[in-house]
Amino acid sequence: MKHLLGAASAAALSLALAVPTSAQEDGLKIGMTFQEMNNPYFVSMQEALMAAAEDLGAEVVVTDAGHDVAKQISDVEDMLTQGIDILLLNPTDSAGIESAVHMAKAQDVIVVAVDANANGPVDTFVGSKNRDAGYQSCKYLAEAIGGEGEVAILDGIPVVPILERVEGCKAALDEFDGVTLVDTQNGRQDRSVALGVVENMIQSHQDLKGIFSVNDGGAMGALAAIQGSGRDIKLTSVDGAPEAVAAIAQGGPFIETTAQFPRDQVRVGLAMALAQKWGARVVPSEVPIDVSVIDAENAADFSW
């Protein structure tokens, strides 16, 4: 099955790269709605989309939901009035956005969910292996503290990718009999919120040895809290953001992030949509994108 999926993905990518003039002739219009743009992860995704659209000669409409599902639905409605052919959807609420997916499909628009899936008749979902990311980061953390000690999870907004990271993290920690999960608190994937949350964690748990953050934004707040405490607490995370990678390269409490590849996600997502628009009958319903451990050994050479 994996080989079939790979072959289908490769075929779709080849088609997307080989037929750029069709987009120019058809006046292709692509809409992409992001859950937020106050995040370098999504900024890099947008940059890759704009570069691909330029190669295709396609028009792009981009919106920022600001984590407001009502606004995101309204943004999609506006895109549909503008006559988009493809909707790339990065949902701020997987269930809440379902009505917008139905609206798009009612107008024969191809819908591809990117990074986080959406309820409803989505044609393809392209996203990171988030459970693997959480698993790898927490296995790294447990090994870094010698397989013994108290650890905590800095959680985030309850969307599927974050839930999967936490699930993977807990699965990894369960493999170490000497490691105890003593606290899980929500930092809302925000540096300033996470700073206060982790300060409280550290004060409440005098034997805390490690923290896993569900994303690098929260991890940077956690890093500041750890540094301010003066305690030896290891930190791991998920994303691969430039600031986090730089902090890991410098050494210190932040020892690992499991990197995702936002540029590749949107490129593959667009390729899946183009394949379907150009008549492909075998397009995968889901394309998982691998993740990669980034630590002091390879941080200097990594970028999105």
Image (cartoon, rainbow, N blue to C red):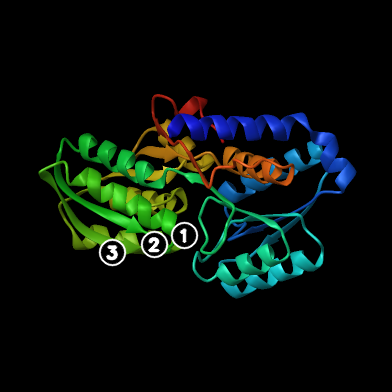
Question: Dot 3 lies on which element?
Answer: helix
Q: Mark 2 and mark 3 in contact (Cβ < 8 Å)?
A: no
**Residue type at tag 3:** Asn
Apparent side of residue 131 relative to residue 36 in the rendered image (left or right) = left
Q: Which residue is mark 2?
A: 187
Residue at x-position 40% and y-position 39%: 257
Q: Which mark is residue 200?
A: 3
Residue occupying the far left of the picture: 177
Q: Is residue 68 visible?
A: no
Q: Which residue is mark 1?
A: 190
**How dense is the environment of label 1, judged by Cα within 10 Å: few (below 14), some, or many (20 and up)?**
many
Apparent side of residue 255 relative to residue 109 in the rendered image (left or right) = left
Question: Dot 1 lies on which element?
Answer: loop
User: Residue 156: percent from the left, percent from the top?
Assistant: 40, 60
Residue mark closest to the camera, 1 vs 3: 1
Closer to the N terminus: mark 3 or mark 2?
2
Q: Mark 2 and mark 1 in contact (Cβ < 8 Å)?
A: yes
Q: How many marks?
A: 3
Apparent side of residue 47 relative to residue 247 in the rendered image (left or right) = right
Apparent side of residue 248 relative to residue 199 in the rendered image (left or right) = right
Residue 110 to residue 274: above or below: below
Q: CA distance from mark 1 to mark 3?
A: 16 Å
Residue at x-position 77% and y-position 42%: 53
Q: Is residue 178 visible?
A: yes
Question: Dot 2 lies on which element?
Answer: loop
